[in-house]
Image: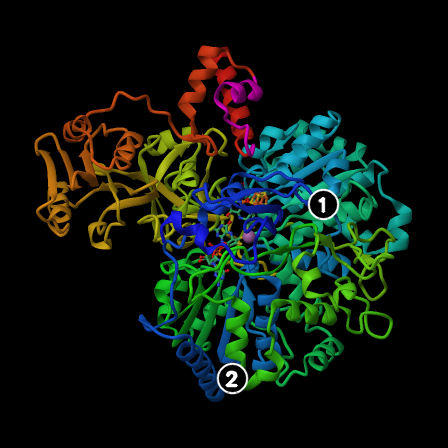
């Protein structure tokens, strides 16, 4: 669907502006959208100044969300075995197949694999169908790969999965320690709030604990480049230090906690700072400095993310952090606490409804008969599950073993994001029935589905999400989706009805589901039952209007003010009362464990994985926006320059990264910010965007024994140079057929009016490849071909024009290639100019300066442009760069990189 047609989809009910929540990360920023037919997307998008997460700010991903609204690539109708079907047929087929398999093999033979990007209402009905009516708890979510360790950490300590903190604490803290969190790129608005707080209060300290030097370190007073996996030892050391220096809040510990002595005993194994420094591979002075700051900072906030969770000791790492907060009473007070920041927009909502296989619903679980009975009575469940279901890795194992015969995957792309991804793909290929609901037609997971159900997505449906600090906000529909697309909750309920559970799934609008969810949270949630943290008692009778305009509010939401407005609760545990049976928090004695794989002569490198600033997960949304593809255009492996030299790798060349599970081919980026012996590969690239870049093919499915969360941050691999015999690039108005890409290294980059492919080859001959491309393009009378072949020099150029308009441009060379940006601009000409025709054929470099890698995506400012301006205009601050080039003056997402560029520039000048 062409972009200019967007405005015709504006919901008729939306007259002025609509408030909604960002579709991306767990910061949960509020947004304001107003129809504006002059914008290409049809919308003005800005930050909601009244939203307590962002107060009007947005990062680059959020700010460009409207640009992803087009219908290109959407799944447009249900499909059964590759054939289009109507909804009635597709729903009957799904229900029929599930029912048949359950009748024959029992409820444990089916499963749902869902997502922290489902809205709470979708999530609630999926969970209710599986656990209350199908009668199995085989529903797990991609949060298993994300938040599972943090959940178990909280539950062990507090008796409940409760994030104690509020974003308000970011401005109040004296010391913020960011553990395993690249906040600048993954939670940019949290980062910006910390940056602003630090500016307002120069006394505030920020410490980053991360094996790599990330963009986040720009803000850090101290960066602890910890040896991968050593976080639990580090926090054990801190606990011992607190004790040695009289910083234990003895009164708080005695009145409100259990298990302190055992935890301290265990922590004392790491009491020797010298030894600890060696264990963690840190300078002893740095370690000592951080300990001292912790000692001096009662308002100590510890934010942690995937560097903690994605580990085979992720739960212990969480509890080692929580122990330090409990011991000092630094919890339930302003400016402090152990704050697990969530990844997906509704990771928290999923935890609230019980989307994990070992949860039940509304923060109850299967460990209590009473809870099972309570939920069964509330749901009037026909087939109540009574025990945990299979966690993600076990679930896909059970599929591989043929025990699970039907799976419904909703809103997640496991063929890319699960560890041992090739095995997951094979398991799904072998599975009897794979149903996938997605908004996109072509993903690595839709490719292996038997039945596809087209989903509405962000901007097209109404529902609620909960962010990192427990704030519930609304996502609102403001456009109509493709005609045949449906909301996830609707599909689930329609299947439930066809399976014979109609009465329990007769919802007409998500508000009805939300009311029921609120009612369950409040059901026997007092002295008559067990007191639970998650309680939305004040929302059980919310009206449709109040629901659609619900202001962001942190749960528990139990009381109302005099005017009937529901009241939220920003901070938990202020009264020192926890949710264990004796209302006391529990210390956990921690014996640190190293990651399960360690480097060895065969596989000497530790492979670390994670995010880049402008891509979201498996790229189905962000890669649609050319702007977001300019920051990092190709999949890469980051390596320390000395390691690269030893391995014979060149910056910008290709490397083969491999282990027993598989191999990748990636662009080499030499970065001094890497630890020696450590590699970093982004998690985003997949079969749709590159030939050999899905990093989860190399990550073994090893999990934390308590949470089942995989060790996605740690694999061991070898690396070597990949020598190609030729390289080139293609710009094509349409995507290239897979056949042209066989046998090549390739990666695809979305441009304004074209797809760009970077290609390199070892065996395939450039000449025959070009011939094959040319013969497959159907030319006619109005087709012009430009072709230049110099076999000896290995130079080939090919361009195809249709009525003078450029359709395809191919360049192959052994060394220099024309500037991509210039060739891209040729695609915007209706009729290609004579000069550019000649230049294309001559492979002439346009003479335009190469702006370099894009740093500021908002204004398209490249690295080389910035470096040149710094030099010629003697710029010394990010503010001056902003004045000169506008870079960094819109969303601010690139400010950490601008600082880094300035610093390295100084460094070079000084050197
Ligand atoms: N741009 C962008 N933002 C996102 C997302 C996205 O896809 N793109 N996804 C969202 C989601 S779902 C999530 S879960 C969050 C994740 O947010 P983050 O957790 O901040 O992001 P990651 O890059 O996965 O990993 C964080 C850091 O952990 C470090 N690390 C690796 N091993 C260790 C270790 O042993 N110890 C310590 N201390 N650190 C280690 C890595 O070097 C990395 O810098 O981001 C959210 N925000
Ligand atoms: N190696 C490694 N692996 C990782 C990680 C890592 O750091 N390293 N991180 C892990 C983490 S933390 C996470 S959260 C996962 C994320 O991994 P995934 O969840 O697999 O990634 P997404 O791209 O977010 O997948 C969402 C899918 O839902 C579709 N979709 C979008 N909107 C809708 C909708 O409204 N309804 C439906 N039905 N579908 C929709 C999208 O098109 C897309 O196909 O990856 C995990 N895997
Ligand atoms: S920080 Fe960026 S991606 Fe995350 S919610 Fe806010 S605007 Fe969206
Ligand atoms: Mo995540």
Asked where in the image residue 201 lies, by quadrant, the reply is top right
Ligand 3 found in image quarter? top right
Tell me where the magenta segment starts and ends, as one range. 877-892
Q: Is residue 446 above or below residue 173?
A: below
Instruction: Give yes or no for residue 878 being in the magenta stretch.
Output: yes
Instruction: Give yes or no for residue 769 being in the magenta stretch.
Output: no
Asked whether residue 270 is in view, the answer is no
Q: Is residue 843 above or below residue 401?
A: above
Residue holding disc 2? 499
Q: Which of the two residues, 96 or 637, is positioned nearer the viewer here?
A: 96
Q: Which mark is residue 269?
A: 1
Q: Which of the two residues, 168 or 677, is positioned nearer the viewer here?
A: 168
Q: Position of residue 718 (x, y in %)?
A: 38, 44
Q: Secondary structure at mark 2?
A: helix
Q: In this image, 265 relative to 37: left or right?
A: right
Q: Position of residue 682 (x, y in %)?
A: 45, 44
Task: Using a 10 Å C-alpha cutoff, classify the residue at mark 1 as few (fewer than 14 neighbours), some (14 to 19) or many (20 or more).
Answer: some
Please report the residue visible at 49 percent of the width from the left and 17 percent of the height from the top: 905
Q: Disc 2 vs disc 1: which is toward the camera?
A: 2
Q: Is residue 29 above or below residue 12?
A: above
Name the quadrant of the N terminus.
bottom left
Tell me whether circle 2 and circle 1 mark residues in contact (CB < 8 Å): no
Task: Using a 10 Å C-alpha cutoff, classify the residue at mark 2 as few (fewer than 14 neighbours), some (14 to 19) or many (20 or more).
Answer: many
Q: Is residue 455 above or below residue 47?
A: below
Q: Which of the two residues, 229 or 173, is positioned nearer the viewer here?
A: 173
Q: In this image, 792 relative to 501: left or right?
A: left
Asked whether residue 263 is in view, the answer is yes
Please report the residue visible at 82 percent of the width from the left and 41 percent of the height from the top: 243
For the residues labelled 2 and 1, the Cα–Cα distance comes to 56 Å
Q: Which mark is residue 529?
A: none
């Amino acid at each position: 669907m062409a972009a200019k047609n967007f405005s015709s989809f504006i919901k008729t009910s939306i007259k002025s502006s609509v408030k909604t929540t960002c579709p991306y990360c767990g910061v949960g920023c509020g947004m304001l959208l107003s129809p504006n037919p002059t914008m290409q997307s049809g919308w003005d998008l800005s930050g909601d100044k009244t939203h307590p997460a962002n107060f009007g700010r947005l990062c680059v991903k959020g700010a460009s969300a409207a640009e992803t609204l087009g219908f290109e690539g959407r799944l447009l109708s249900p499909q059964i075995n590759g054939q289009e079907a109507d909804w009635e047929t597709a729903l009957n087929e799904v229900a029929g197949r599930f029912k048949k398999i359950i009748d024959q093999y029992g409820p444990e033979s089916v499963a749902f694999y869902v997502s922290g990007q489902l809205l709470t209402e979708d999530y609630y009905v999926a969970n209710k169908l599986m656990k209350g009516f199908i009668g199995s708890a085989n529903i797990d979510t991609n949060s298993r790969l994300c938040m599972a360790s943090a959940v178990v950490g909280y539950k062990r300590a507090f008796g409940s999965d409760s994030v104690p903190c509020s974003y308000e604490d970011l401005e109040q803290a004296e010391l913020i320690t960011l553990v395993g969190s690249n906040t600048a790129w993954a939670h940019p608005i949290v980062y910006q709030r910390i940056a602003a707080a630090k500016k307002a209060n120069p006394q505030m300290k920020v410490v980053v604990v991360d094996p790599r030097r990330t963009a986040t370190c720009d803000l850090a007073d101290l960066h602890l480049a910890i040896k991968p996996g050593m976080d639990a030892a580090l926090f054990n050391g801190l606990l011992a230090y607190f004790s040695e220096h009289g910083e234990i809040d003895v009164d708080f510990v005695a009145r409100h906690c259990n298990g302190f002595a055992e935890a301290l005993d265990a922590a004392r194994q790491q009491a020797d700072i010298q030894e600890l420094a060696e264990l963690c591979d840190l300078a002893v002075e740095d370690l000592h400095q951080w300990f001292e700051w912790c000692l001096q900072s009662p308002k100590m906030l510890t934010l942690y993310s995937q560097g903690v969770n994605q580990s085979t000791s992720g739960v212990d790492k969480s509890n080692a952090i929580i122990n330090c907060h409990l011991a000092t009473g630094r919890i339930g007070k302003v400016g402090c606490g152990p704050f697990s920041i969530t990844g997906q927009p509704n990771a928290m909502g999923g935890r609230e409804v019980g989307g994990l296989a070992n949860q039940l619903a509304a923060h109850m679980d299967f460990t209590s008969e009473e809870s099972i009975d309570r939920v069964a009575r509330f749901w009037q469940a026909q087939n109540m599950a009574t025990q945990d279901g299979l966690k993600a890795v076990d679930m896909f194992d059970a599929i591989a073993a043929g025990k699970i015969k039907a799976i419904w995957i909703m809103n997640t792309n496991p063929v890319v994001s699960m560890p041992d991804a090739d095995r997951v793909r094979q398991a799904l290929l072998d599975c009897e029935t794979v149903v996938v609901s997605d908004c996109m037609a072509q993903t690595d997971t839709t490719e292996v589905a038997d039945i596809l159900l087209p989903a509405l997505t962000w901007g097209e449906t109404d529902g609620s999400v909960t962010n990192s600090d427990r704030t519930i906000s609304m996502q609102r529909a403001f456009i109509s989706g493709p005609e045949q697309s449906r909301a996830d909750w609707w599909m689930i309920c329609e299947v439930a009805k066809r399976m014979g559970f109609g009465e329990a799934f007769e919802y007409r609008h998500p508000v009805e589901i939300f009311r029921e969810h609120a009612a369950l949270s409040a059901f026997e949630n007092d002295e008559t039952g067990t007191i639970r943290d998650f309680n939305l008692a004040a929302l059980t009778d919310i009206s449709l209007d109040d629901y659609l305009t619900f202001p962001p509010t942190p749960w528990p939401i139990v009381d109302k003010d005099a005017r009937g407005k529901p009241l939220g609760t920003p901070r938990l545990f202020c009264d020192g009362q926890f949710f264990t049976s004796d209302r006391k928090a529990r210390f956990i004695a921690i014996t640190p464990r190293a990651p399960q794989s360690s480097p060895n002569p065969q596989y000497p490198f530790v492979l670390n994985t994670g995010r880049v600033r402008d891509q979201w997960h498996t790229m189905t949304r962000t890669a649609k926006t050319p702007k977001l593809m300019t920051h990092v255009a190709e999949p890469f492996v980051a390596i320390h320059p000395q390691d690269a030299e030893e391995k014979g790798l060149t910056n910008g060349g290709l490397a083969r990264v491999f282990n027993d599970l598989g191999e990748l081919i990636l662009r080499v980026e030499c970065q001094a910010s890497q630890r020696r012996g450590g590699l970093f590969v982004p998690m985003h690239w997949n079969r749709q965007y590159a030939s050999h870049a899905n990093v989860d093919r190399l990550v073994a499915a090893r999990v934390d024994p308590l949470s089942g969360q995989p060790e996605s941050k740690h694999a061991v691999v070898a690396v070597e140079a990949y020598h190609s015999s030729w390289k080139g690039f293609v710009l094509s108005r349409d995507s290239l057929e897979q056949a042209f890409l066989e046998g090549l290294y390739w990666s695809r980059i979305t441009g304004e009016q074209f797809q760009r492919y970077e290609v390199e080859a070892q065996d395939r001959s450039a000449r025959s490849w070009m011939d094959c491309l040319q013969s497959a393009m159907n030319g006619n009378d109005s087709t012009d071909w430009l072709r230049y072949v110099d076999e000896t020099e290995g130079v080939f150029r090919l361009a195809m024009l249709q009525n003078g308009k450029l359709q395809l441009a191919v360049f192959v060379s052994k060394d220099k290639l024309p500037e991509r940006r210039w060739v891209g601009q040729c695609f915007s000409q209706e009729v290609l100019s004579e000069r550019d025709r000649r230049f294309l054929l001559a492979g002439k470099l346009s003479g335009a300066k190469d702006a370099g890698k894009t740093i500021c995506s908002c204004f398209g400012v490249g690295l080389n442009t910035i470096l040149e301006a710094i030099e010629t205009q003697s710029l010394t601050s990010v503010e001056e760069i902003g004045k000169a080039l506008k870079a960094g003056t819109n969303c601010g997402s690139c400010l950490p990189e601008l600082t880094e560029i300035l610093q390295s520039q100084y460094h070079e000048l000084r050197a």
